[in-house]
Image (tube, grey):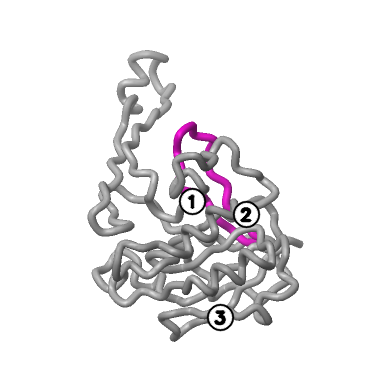
Amino acid sequence: MANHIDLSHVITNGMVTYPGLPVPTIGVHLSREAAEEVYGPDITFTIGMIEICTNTGTYLDVPYHRFGDGHDLTELSLERVAQVPAVCLNKVGTTEIELTADEVAGLAGHAVLIRTDHSVHFGTDSYSVDHPHLTEASAIALREVGVACVGIDSLNIDSTEGGERPVHTVLLQADIPIVEHLTNLRELPDSGFTFTAVPPKIEKAGTFTVRAFATV
């Protein structure tokens, strides 16, 4: 029997995903009390309202996030992010992660998840300090082998020391989606599972929250 492992953070009212970005506001459009006035006694529904930055919780980037002429979420190929054969590379304890060509050999068409366990700091000040990230050379190695998508359980797949984002540039230019702020990667085997992280089809959006999970 298949076992599903949730790899997403819970989204709560006012939570901080990335310092400086707007926090989500979760409210109610139609309350249960108001619904009874519309539908009758003891007939209740609730309709919620949410104002959310596209970079909230666990989210996926497509080329439009980085490039004005790149495709948006509406053109994301499901073959890249739905039930994709996957591997989890254990890089716990490494801040600047350098993946070699040999390390990613044979991973064409795979989702490559980078485990750092930095997700334990999510929602705290420590999450944005010395966060693990890939190097540009790692991104090139992943691009050259032809992976389906890449994910990491950290603040950013790139270093945030400066303004350059070489990993985003290399991967998104090659139409390789990026999933950031994953969690629970410690629950995964090294291989032998599939990965799913599908966002809604939103026009002119380059990033959005996903429910990411592994199926073992």
Q: Position of residue 123 (x, y in %)?
A: 30, 64
What residue is shown at x 41% (from left), y 23% (from top)? Answer: 42
Residue 214 magenta = yes
Which is more toward the observer, 144 or 193?
144
Question: Is 153 in the magenta?
Answer: no
**36 and 210: which one is in front?**
210
Question: Does dot 2 land on a helix, a strand or a loop?
Answer: strand
Where does residue 105 sit, x and y in percent of width and height? 71, 75
Task: Assess whether mark 3 and mark 2 are in contact (beta carbons under 8 angstroms).
Answer: no
Type of the residue with mark 1:
Asp
**Label 1 residue SS:** strand
Q: Quadrant of the C terminus?
A: bottom right
Total tally of numbered discs in the picture: 3
Report which residue position mark 2 lands on. Answer: 196
At label 3, the amino acid type is Asn
Q: CA distance from mark 2 to mark 1?
A: 14 Å
State whether residue 173 is above or below residue 38. Answer: below
Residue drawn at 29 percent across, 54 percent down = 15
Which residue is tagged 3?
90
Q: Residue at x 36, y 74 (%)?
A: 131
* In the image: residue 205, left or right of residue 185: left
Which residue was labeled with disc 1?
A: 61
- Span colored in magenta: 195-216
